[in-house]
Image (cartoon, grey):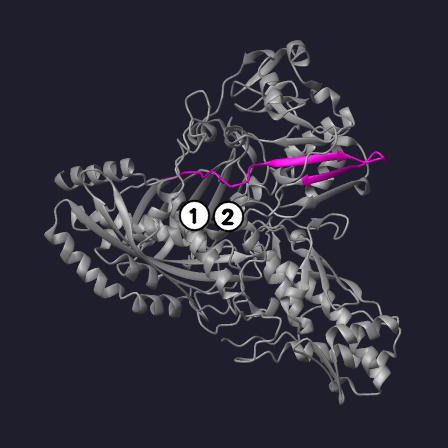
Amino acid sequence: MRSLIDTKHADNTLSKDNAAEDCVNKASNNVNDASSVVAANNIGLGGVGRSKKHESADKHVSGEALYIDDRPNLQGQLHAAVGQSSIAHGLIKSIDLSAVRAAEGVFAVITVDDVPGHTDIGPVFPGDPVLAIGKVEYVGQPIFAVAATSHDLARRAVKLANIEYEELPAVLTVKDALAKQSFVRPPFSMTRGDSASAILQAEHQLSGEISVGGQEHFYLEGQISTAEPNEDGGMTVFSSSQHPSEVQKLVAEVLGIPLNKVVVDTRRMGGGFGGKETQAAPWACIAALLSNETKRPVKFKLSRSDDMCMTGKRHPFENNYHVGFDSNGQIKGINIEVNGNCGYSPDLSDAIVDRAMFHSDNAYFLDQATVTGNRCKLNTVSHTAYRGFGGPQGMMTIEMVMDDIARHLGKDPLEIRKINLYGKDERNETHYHQIVEHNKMAELITSLEQSSDYQARRASITQFNSENSILKKGIALTPVKFGISFTVQHLNQAGALVHIYTDGTIHLNHGGTEMGQGLYTKVAQIVAEEFQVNVDTVGVSATRTDKVPNTSPTAASSGTDLNGKAAQAAAKIIKTRLIAFACEKYAVNNTEVTFKDSQVLIGTETFSFAEFVQQAYMGRVSLSSTGFYKTPKIYFDRASGKGRPFFYYSTGAAVSEVLIDTLTGEYKVLRADILHDVGHSLNPAIDIGQIEGAFIQGMGWLTTEELVWNEQGRLLSNNPATYKIPAISDTPADFRVTLVPDDPNREQTIYNSKAVGEPPFMLGISVWSALKDAISSVSDHKLSPKLDTPATPERVLWAVEAIKQQAQA
């Protein structure tokens, strides 16, 4: 089992108890030293570095895990629904809600005029009214809300409204938005060198464009909130949210009450993937407004079709490039433009398009580069966060460039990828001027190339394709370099609360939310490791805004990095107090106090952890502490386009092999080999599960998951029958996932681990590139196919036919 890491230089603040100051300081040093000696084959009882199943795994499979919809109905509870816009863009001329108010079971009907506080709930920039204000900007926009005695009665009632509109022209394509300069935020560019001159002077030039489709989050648990009024005019909200603190803030603002009167509770979500980072808030706000109006509890649960129509997706992008390169395939200059379809409002689009721009290099050095990002405003639902947060859409362009250069020069795309990788001591500065440190991408790719038998398989596939005119195989190896940190600096902070009870059990609370990814399990392991107790004695409670305040969203792959460090800081504070107490009570040196195997060894004395905690309690030692952590080193000056927006990079690579039918466009992923760097894994089983799931979700985004809007701006793919997520049958029959062995994060992250939530999502790009490889084989790899995503069988067939026509021309 791999070694764990030196954390003695971690930037954690330790408090001082009433014991002698020198004893506290020595105890503090002892705590840090103890954290640094968890070595190979000596994994502590806490289990950091050991595979442990998800803390709710048994509850998930047995049905005992409680989600918001499983909570018993409260006395007098009502149910909410909203009346939706039927057009994409228009002024509201009149609203007649008399039939709605008279409908069976209806207790209250509200419009924006009934909101006592703020009416705009935009998370960063204004533009998201909680209910429509005078006009509508997408099909499905909430105009009014109803509270009724049942879910079905509420949904029936909203259909009785009579609303007249004055329709306005709707912007429904990115090209239309660009032509009209319709943006939710101003365009922005990042520049390194003189790309135009470099392209012009290069031996070869190419241009291309790609349409990258969006993606429905399709979480198992839909959007849902329950609001319960309190006796002091406040509100308790149970919300399926990745960002309880934001829900707290927005509920307080729409109600016009202080934040300390609102408590938001999130025990778990049935999936989030970014769809519940900002877009859980509207439904919580509406439930709270109706609860405030009726003085009764209100549950608001979206049906699947309403959820899909009224909530944002992964941003669709339309990107283009102009590149200059030499005869070896090395890029000399490049211009990239990424055009994000943001929908009708800013939401998080500014940061999402920024991240697409940051990741337009992926793993490749772009010496002379200009990357421009446009945030296009369309009359569709406002698109939002999704696993990767714009990074995947940015990476697609440069991976297309690698394939196009390879076809142009008659080389293997892997050769072109390898020659353009970031270097170590040179060719290591990004187009936003961050140095790529501790870069081992070349070694990682070489290792995967060898372990996957890439070259032998490439030769075998070439032979297969020469002997088969209908079935064609393709293979591709693509890398991922993904920056870890929120690009908005102030979000890179976290808090935690740890209590030790007198029986030796531990209570843990932190700002991270559990959406199935295993965050609670990992952070419990961290706390158990600090005290060297069994992780099963650490209980993690629901994320609540009255326990840990002002928290950041669980997003940006930062959940464990931030909350794990905060929880460790809290545990170390308590441990410091315990060591100081032991020094004073037993007249020993701090080096004679050891926590091991649920015991505390003090000189020649040995106590169970519970016994010693009881002694500390009798000695009036505080057994509770908060902890705090903020990510160091990060900054970004947007005015100059320069800085260090990321604390470190997470890296990986995947080899995918596919088989296509050139007569139908049908295809199958035959094999996938993944090698991914998670530093020192806190929990290998959970990390591998995250990698597997991310790869399949990324593959689904690029192959089967197609969002379709009609010419009136109505979403047609609004249910499981019309929107296809990957099934178990789509999983490669040969699926190999390996963690890079014994490679600690060089930055001082929690136990020198690396984030694992988002980075492996982009490994799915290898499937898309392999499909292009198979299609290109129709022209003996002389032509590079245009393959927009999702690469459905229809698009694959059209690409095959286009290549055939080009080859014959």
Q: How crowded is mark 1: few (under 14 residues within 10 Å), some or many (20 or more)?
A: many
Q: Which is more N-terminal, label 2 or label 1?
A: 2
Name the residue rendered at 43%, 65% in the picture: 427
Amino acid type at image mark 1:
Gln
Residue 523: give x, y in percent of width and height: 63, 62
**Quadrant of residue 529 in the image?**
bottom right
Q: Which residue lies furthest to the bottom in this view?
A: 604
Which residue, given by chain and number where applicable, does mark 2 sit on?
387
Q: How crowded is mark 2: few (under 14 residues within 10 Å), some or many (20 or more)?
A: many
Residue 661: give x, y in percent of width and height: 20, 43
Give the position of the C terminus as an image quadrant.
top left
Q: Is residue 142 above or below residue 317?
A: above
Q: Is residue 479 above or below residue 377?
A: below
Residue 197 showing in the rendered view: no
Q: How far apart are marks 1 and 2 (CA)?
A: 9 Å
The boundaries of the magenta stretch are 211-238
Amino acid type at image mark 2:
Arg
Residue 430: give x, y in percent of width and height: 48, 58
**Quadrant of residue 29 in the image?**
bottom right
Horizontally, is 463 left or right of 278 in the view?
Answer: left
Which residue, given by chain and number where applicable, does mark 1 sit on?
697
Look at the numbered discs 1 and 2 and tell me whether their residues touch, using CB distance below 8 Å: yes
Horizontally, is 195 left or right of 163 in the view?
Answer: left
Near-viewer residue (123 or 340): 123
